[in-house]
Image (tube, rainbow, N blue to C red):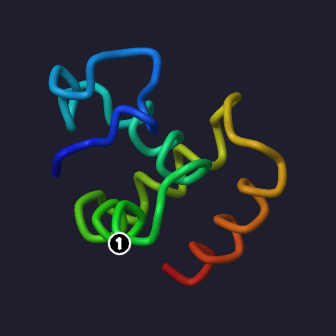
C-alpha cells in the first residue's frame, strides 16, 4: 500500500514498515483514513491484533475507539 503524506504528516510515508510500525499505521488509518485505506487495513492485519491496538491505544480519539470496538466485537 502506498501511504498518503496527509495521513502520515509527521514522517516520510515511504519509510513506514507495515510490520515494525503496525500500531502507528493502524491508529492513523482508524482515526483519519479513507475507505480504501480502511479496507486495506481490514484485510492486511489480523482482527485480534486490531482489537489489541484499539484497546491499548493512547492515540485514538474516543469516538473512533468506540466505533472500532463495536465493529471488531464479533471478529
Crowdedness near tag 1: few (<14), some (14–19) or many (≥20) residues, C-alpha within 10 Å: few
Q: Which residue is mark 1?
A: 39
Side of 2 relative to 52 (left or right): left
Q: Residue furthest front?
A: 6
Q: Residue furthest bottom?
A: 74
Side of 19 relative to 46 (left or right): left
Q: Quadrant of residue 13?
A: top left
Side of 24 relative to 63 (left or right): left
Question: Residue 65 in the image: x percent, y percent?
Answer: 73, 54
Question: Residue 7 in the image: x percent, y percent?
Answer: 45, 38
Q: Residue furthest top?
A: 11
Residue shown at the point (66%, 47%) measured from the top left = 55
Residue shown at the point (44%, 71%) measured from the top left = 35
Q: Quadrant of residue 23?
A: top left
As helix, strand or loop, the secondary structure at mark 1 comes to helix
Residue shown at the point (77%, 43%) measured from the top left = 61
Residue shown at the point (41%, 52%) measured from the top left = 49
Question: Residue 46 in the image: x percent, y percent?
Answer: 31, 61
* Of 48 and 40, the residue lying toward us: 40
Question: Residue 6 in the image: x percent, y percent?
Answer: 44, 36
- Residue 64 vs 75, above or below: the answer is above
Q: Total label count?
A: 1
Amino acid at each position: 500500500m502506498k501511504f498518503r503524506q496527509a495521513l502520515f504528516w509527521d514522517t516520510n510515508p515511504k519509510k513506514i514498515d507495515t510490520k515494525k510500525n503496525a500500531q502507528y499505521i493502524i491508529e492513523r488509518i482508524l482515526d483519519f483514513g479513507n475507505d480504501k485505506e480502511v479496507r486495506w487495513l481490514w484485510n492486511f492485519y489480523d482482527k485480534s491484533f486490531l482489537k489489541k491496538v484499539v484497546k491499548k491505544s493512547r492515540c485514538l480519539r474516543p469516538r473512533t475507539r468506540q466505533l472500532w470496538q463495536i465493529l471488531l466485537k464479533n471478529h
